[in-house]
Amino acid sequence: MEKNLIKRLLQICQSAEARFTRSKGLNQFQQDYNIGTVMGASLHFSPHDKSQIRALLLNTESIDADTTDPTQWDGLSRTESLALGSNEKLTHSAVRQQRVAIKHLPQQALLLGGSRLVLPEGSNLDVNWQTIVQQSQHDTVLVVENWEAFERIHQAQLDFSLAGKNPLVVFRGSPVYQQDHTIALLEALQRPVFAFVDFDPAGLMLAQSLPCFQDTILPPMTVLESHLQACTNHERYQKQLPQTAQALDSSQHATIAKAWEMLKHYGVALPQERFL
């Protein structure tokens, strides 16, 4: 996480309020981690949501949300900030500039510069996207929308064979890894792109808007339908409709069109983490 987002999350955890003004970073956090509920121009964080945020900050950044002052990183250098949190991203420096997060599927390897690199499960490689363009030997690309699904893709109960034998797995991007860099990578690689996204209007729109998009990864329709029947997130679905419905109604992509019809039938938003 970047420093400004961490500071905002600390403020949320330490506040007695439940509603907070939406921002680009906070909106992306809600989409990436499915924590919090959109309510008009605000995001609502319940006590359970705040508990999840506390655990996330502790596990990923070694930050105790109950004792950490959100302002205490202000003005510190990157080295000085290391004494307060677990990594150097807590400074003002844009340390992820031009970089993307990549990995490989289970039982596969990253093919870069003529070498095979096998990463531990749950890990990824942080690389300048231009270096990947120069060195990648992967024939296809698999873009993953949310960080948790990207990080835990080895636990996904899905068949990724549609995306090829050994796709380059790329995180879609967030306030830390800018989405523009992922798009630049895809445009430069010019390889078939497959998408593992949330099963909601915004996810389908994201998938079909990717450069070189070929198809989206879905479970068998019977499995997908059982998840949709159990899902109750109607509000998120309704919130996304004004920006997506017209484009999805006119989609010429067979899988997107079929998925959109099913999604309209149930009227819910299903996060991809449900398949982990």
Image: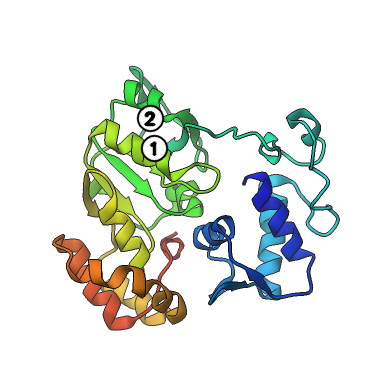
Task: Decide which of tag 2 and tag 1 comes sooner along the chain.
Answer: 1
The residue tagged 1 is 104
Question: What's under tag 2, amino acid-wise?
Answer: Leu
Q: Left or right? Give the position of 230 relative to 162.
A: right
The residue tagged 2 is 110
- Could one spot residue 159 in this view of the protein? no
Q: Quick check: marks 2 and 1 in contact, CB under 8 Å?
A: yes
Whole-angstrom CA distance, mark 2 to mark 1, is 6 Å
Instruction: Check disc 1 and report its element: helix, strand or loop.
Output: loop
Residue located 65% across and 52% down the image: 5
Residue 16 falls in which quadrant of the image?
bottom right
Instruction: Locate residue 221, reporting x and y percent.
Output: 24, 70
Residue located 60% across and 35% down the image: 94
- Could one spot residue 155 in this view of the protein? yes
Residue located 24% across and 66% down the image: 247
Q: Left or right? Give the position of 248 relative to 16.
A: left
